[in-house]
Amino acid sequence: MNKEPRLRFTDEERSDPALEKPIRKADRAAAKADRAQAKIPKKQVRQKTVDPKTGKVTTKLVLEDKKKPPSKLSHAVRDTPGDAALGKLHKEIRETEQDNVGEESAHKSEEAAETGARLVREGYRSHKLKPYRKAAQAEQRLAKANINALYQKSLRDNPQLSSNPFSRWQQKQAIKKEYAAAKHAGQAAGGTAKTAGKTGKAAKTVKEKVQQAGAFVMRHKKGFGIVLALFLVVCLLMNTVSSCSMLGQSIGSVVSGTTYPSDDPELLAVEADYAAKEAELQSEIDNIESSHPGYDEYRYDLDMIGHDPHELAAYLSAVLQGYTRQSAQTELERVFDAQYELTLTEEVEVRYRTETRTDSQGNSYTVQVPYNYYILNVKLTSKSISSVASELLTPEQLEMYQVYRQTLGNKPLIFGGGSTNTSDSESLTGVQFVNGTRPGNQAVVDIAKSQVGNVGGQPYWSWYGFNSRVEWCACFVSWCYGQMGLSEPRFAGCQSQGIPWFQSHGQWGGRGYANIAPGDAIFFDWDLDGSADHVGLVVGTDGSRVYTVEGNSGDACKIRSYDLNYECIKGYGLMNW
């Protein structure tokens, strides 16, 4: 077993507060690895030595220094070809012994005995290989500690890397590769030492051949000069192609390393599951008074319910890497429980009411009568998934989470992120709108039009409850409805929240719906994959085109128009005013 490289640090580095902890951890891991190596039993081998002066040969026993590799056995019993043959034989015997209970019982005993013997053999072998496994585990822990120490030292020497999570991630990957290369070089050096004797023996023969070849070249100098020039040109061209190829591979590696590793349908399904859990929580709060009757007063202290879909996808990708709807459920529960806490607290106040009474002489008088006044306090506390991530993720997972957040998994529109159209806002001058039979609401359209020119969407996503910028087209539409005093529809995701709300309320019309009205929501599917990517508000239609106000259209509020049969229009959320 090849030992991990032992790092050496200067006194100055050891006294640096930023490096003190990782260096101390690496030292402890190295000490544990040395102790584990020391516990590996060594066997005696015969070693022959030759006295260079007398030529006398001496044989003595020494401890073998070569380490065995750790066993690949698991704690479970492995199936071997012999076991397979025995199993087949037992099966044939059972087929011919169905009517003989005694023989069947004896055969079962035989099987049990063979299994017990096999367990004993495997247990003994596993016990003998335990020191090797311990040593291998210690070396792995040492490698991890060494890499972390080198990474912290790199951040100290290059403070500019610490400002960018993507740069930190790239730096750590580079250090891992360099460390692996150093270890591999150490192993190769051992192999080189073993072959040094053979190399020495062949040196004279090689030298003679080189001298003969040199004489031949001198006799044909001009020809070899032309060949050498052509060779250099070819090498230059090959080097250029190789550099381009390496650059392409490097770029591809960075892109693949920052892209959500899960398939798009799984990402959307998991997002929908989480949105459904939030909808259940909202429904539970809305029905508190019917599910907990009998109180004189209900007091509510509620934080926002909602999340950034990209934060959830980045979290799950950092923890689970490629995940599916099924494999993500346990982690979804964990995140949800950390993000939301609903508490119901009963409070009893002693209050007094005035009652009029009559004494024995018929005189009326008033008294203050105490009674219990029952209050149910409903409190919902919520956190953003980013703050949950900082609590639940390991440092390495948190670093990967930040990379995914920065790149949006290279899929910015997968959850309904907006439009990448950066052209100027259109003008409504001269447009003749055609009124349908549905009334619509011109007031909400005027509110939306007043926001044209906003860049960045800060009022809308912060109104919704997010602490930092998200893809905010849905937040903008929800904000416009909220300015009209509506508590719903309220959604931050087009496909996972917006469309399900309209469809569940029977307020949905597909592309080509003939009776759209001002204030309706219009949903778009840019890549035609069946999932909505963007949403805006309908201003109206002139009979051939539909005019909209959209948030996050090139990161700004703009007026747009589309042919009524435009294939990327997924449908309309129909508002009832």
Image: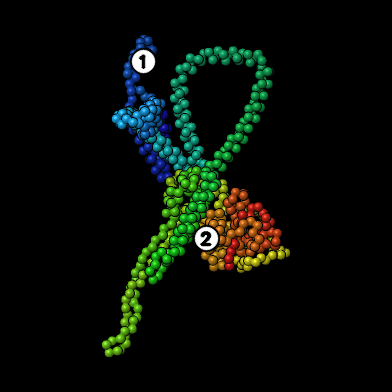
Q: Is residue 507 above or below residue 409?
A: below
- Displayed quadrant of residue 440: bottom right
Q: Position of residue 41 (x, y in %)?
A: 32, 27
Q: Position of residue 337 (x, y in %)?
A: 42, 54
Identified at 48% across, 38% down, the residue is 175
Depth check, front residue: 295 or 106:
106
Identified at 68% across, 56% down, the residue is 563
Label 1: how many Cα within 10 Å (few below 14, some 14–19, many 20+) = few
Residue on which disc 1 sits: 48
- Displayed quadrant of residue 349: bottom left
Depth check, front residue: 473 or 147:
473
**Residue with the most extreme left position:** 360
Q: Is residue 311 above or below residue 69?
A: below
**Residue with the most extreme front position:** 99
Q: Is residue 37 left or right of residue 318?
A: left
- Whether label 2 touches label 1, CB < 8 Å: no
**SS for callout 1:** strand
Image quadrant for the C terminus? bottom right
Identified at 56% across, 61% down, the residue is 506
**Badge 2 amino acid:** Tyr
CA separation, marks 2 and 1? 82 Å
**SS for callout 2:** helix
Depth check, front residue: 111 or 372:
111
Residue on which disc 2 sits: 464
Name which of mark 2 and mark 1 comes first in the sequence. Answer: 1
> What number of labels is visible?
2
Q: Position of residue 216 (x, y in %)?
A: 63, 13
**Badge 1 amino acid:** Lys
Label 2: how many Cα within 10 Å (few below 14, some 14–19, many 20+) = many
Question: Can residue 342 be seen at all in this image of the molecule?
Answer: yes
Q: Position of residue 244 (x, y in %)?
A: 62, 35
